[in-house]
Image (cartoon, grey):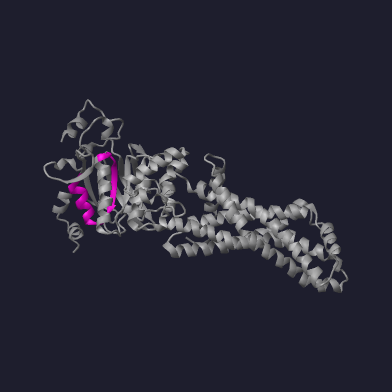
């Protein structure tokens, strides 16, 4: 991989100690500058205890720039907790969390607000504000920042077009179907073009075509917008889509999805499997499928 | 955790919430439209129930005390008695309790559902502090409207007393009104306004705290709503006792 050379070069020192030694293992497409070698998200030995239960136990991983990290795992293994920790919605009991090389572990709520502006978060059920219309939901961030209404409207329409829901602009969340709510949630999270996006089981409880649409949105972000993301899921078809297809713009200017073929390296997805708050697998989907671990095989096959 | 520890922890959390909400009021962005919307739903929305309870409380005060006063030959003092009980005591407490039933429950249920459906987390994730956006406007709206509602309750209650004494007992209207005017002092009215200010602050913080602490799905929302209403009602009544005592000392009404 071409990335390896540029990172390991000794005359190219990493800024302070933020780049860890095995950063080059990651499969990012190319290194334009040293900045890309700083992981978008890094967990260092994070432990989290709820009451007496260790929800996360010494969890360490990295999400490189432009990479989609698919976190697999059964219910209650700490997947959602992990995402909430990135946003500082929860605080770890031990360990460090770095976002864009910045240690956010000890950040106060006020400092955290600045970090959160860089991150888009898509919640399990969409978590739309049900007292606000779709338009107001998507515009929430811009309204809070006091952006003029004309700019707000064009941005909201652009975001809703991205998720293909421009018709629903005047509806209330209660009038939307589950998949539509999820998509509005995505539009809302993407306002301001965050470079880091978290998906918390975005396809849970959706029919397969709608789930596919959500995965396509994640692929578009990964391949066309250079977004780093964590995609928490326990549905295997999500893994198939995200690891075997990629989005490109064809001659007609439309976004199309192509199966991986010769261009294997294009797909920038990595898999992390968790069990009981610990990483039991980390790597590509091919190695995951070949893993010997009984739990992993059971998880993949369902029996 | 034992009971005392839990109580202390709860007290600490409520104080921190109140402090954060208060700090939020002095920083930009100011959530003026939210506060006005809350004032509308808390204040204007509660007007009907306050008018009804006020009127009938004043009426029943007259109804119950008229015979007693008559046996002492002191029916000319009925207006004084009704007014003083309403302005000093029943107005603030009854209004606070009615608003607790209507508003505290609504606030904690609303915030509780927002917690359960991850809307609070979503708001934080979008870079907005829910304490400033949701908690501060609600507490402020209560602090502004509760004294006003109390005044309305007082006035309507006095009118209720007048209606009963005039139409039921045939007392001359002027006798009632003059005894009201002679009886009430400025201190009574000031005390009657300070009380709801404190009540509103306590009710608002308790409602928001209980709502934001909700866990355990829809059942949790029910639990936190009940707990908010019960706690707020009890705190209002306890605070009323100590406030009454403090006001007597401060305003010097105890020697009267």
Asked whether, in this view, residue B6 is left or right of residue B246, the answer is left
Count of numbered circles on the image: 0
In this rendering, does residue A284 appear at all?
no
In this rendering, does residue A28 appear at all?
yes
Segment colored magenta:
A224-246
> Residue A182 location in percent, x, y?
34, 53
The structure residue drawn at horizontal position 22% and vertical position 25%, both measured from the top left corner, is A11
> Residue A70 location in percent, x, y?
25, 49
Question: From the viewer's perspective, is residue A45 above or below residue A124?
Answer: above
The structure residue drawn at horizontal position 54% and vertical position 39%, both measured from the top left corner, is B27
The structure residue drawn at horizontal position 82% and vertical position 56%, both measured from the top left corner, is B255
Quarter of the image for the N terminus of chain A: give it: top left
In the picture as drawn, the residue positioned furthest to the top comes out as: A11
Residue A233 falls inside the magenta stretch: yes
Image-quadrant location for residue A246: top left
> Residue B101 location in percent, x, y?
59, 63
């Amino acid at each position: 991989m071409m990335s390896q050379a540029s990172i390991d070069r000794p005359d190219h020192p990493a800024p302070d100690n933020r780049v860890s030694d095995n950063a080059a293992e990651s499969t990012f497409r190319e290194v334009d500058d040293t900045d890309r070698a700083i992981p978008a998200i890094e967990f260092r030995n994070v432990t989290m205890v709820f009451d007496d239960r260790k929800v996360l136990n010494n969890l360490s991983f990295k999400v490189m720039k432009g990479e989609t990290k698919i976190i697999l795992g059964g219910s209650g293994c700490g997947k959602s907790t992990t995402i909430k920790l990135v946003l500082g919605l929860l605080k770890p009991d031990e360990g460090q969390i770095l976002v864009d090389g910045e240690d956010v572990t000890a950040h106060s709520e006020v400092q955290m607000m600045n970090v959160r502006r860089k991150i888009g978060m898509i919640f399990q059920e969409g978590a739309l504000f049900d007292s606000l219309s779709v338009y107001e939901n998507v515009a929430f961030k811009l309204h809070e920042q006091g952006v003029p209404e004309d700019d707000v409207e064009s941005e909201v329409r652009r975001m809703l077009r991205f998720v293909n829901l421009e018709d629903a602009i005047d509806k209330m969340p209660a009038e939307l179907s589950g998949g539509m709510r999820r998509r509005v949630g995505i539009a809302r999270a993407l306002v301001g073009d965050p470079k880091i996006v978290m998906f918390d089981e975005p396809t849970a409880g959706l029919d397969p075509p709608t789930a596919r649409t959500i995965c396509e949105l994640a692929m578009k972000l990964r391949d066309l917008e250079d977004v780093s993301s964590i995609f928490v899921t326990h549905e295997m078809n999500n893994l198939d889509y995200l690891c075997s297809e990629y989005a490109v713009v064809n001659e007609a200017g439309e976004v199309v999805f192509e199966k991986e073929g010769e261009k294997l390296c294009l797909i920038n997805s990595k898999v992390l499997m968790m069990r009981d708050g610990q990483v039991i697998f980390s790597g590509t989907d091919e190695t995951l499928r070949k893993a010997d671990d009984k739990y992993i095989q059971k998880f993949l096959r369902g029996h | 955790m034992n009971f005392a520890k839990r109580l202390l922890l709860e007290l600490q959390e409520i104080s921190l919430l109140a402090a954060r909400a208060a700090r939020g009021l002095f920083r930009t962005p100011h959530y003026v439209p939210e506060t006005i919307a809350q004032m509308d739903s808390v204040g204007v929305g509660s007007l009907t129930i306050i008018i009804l309870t006020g009127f009938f409380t004043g009426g029943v005060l007259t109804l119950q005390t008229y015979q007693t006063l008559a046996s002492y030959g002191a029916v000319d003092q009925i207006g004084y008695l009704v007014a003083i009980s309403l302005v000093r005591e029943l107005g603030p407490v009854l209004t606070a309790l009615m608003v607790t039933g209507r508003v505290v429950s609504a606030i904690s249920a609303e915030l509780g559902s927002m917690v359960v459906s991850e809307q609070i987390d979503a708001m934080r994730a979008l870079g907005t502090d829910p304490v400033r956006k949701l908690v501060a406007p609600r507490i402020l709206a209560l602090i502004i409207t509760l004294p006003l509602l109390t005044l309305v309750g007082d006035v309507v209650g006095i009118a209720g007393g007048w209606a009963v004494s005039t139409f039921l007992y045939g007392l001359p209207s002027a006798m009632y009104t003059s005894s009201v005017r002679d009886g009430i002092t400025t201190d009574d009215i000031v005390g009657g306004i300070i009380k709801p200010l404190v009540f509103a602050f306590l009710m608002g913080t308790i409602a928001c705290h209980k709502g934001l602490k909700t866990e355990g799905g829809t059942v949790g929302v029910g639990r936190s709503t009940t707990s908010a209403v019960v706690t707020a009602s009890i705190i209002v009544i306890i605070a009323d006792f100590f406030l009454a005592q403090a006001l007597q000392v401060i305003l010097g009404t105890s020697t009267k």
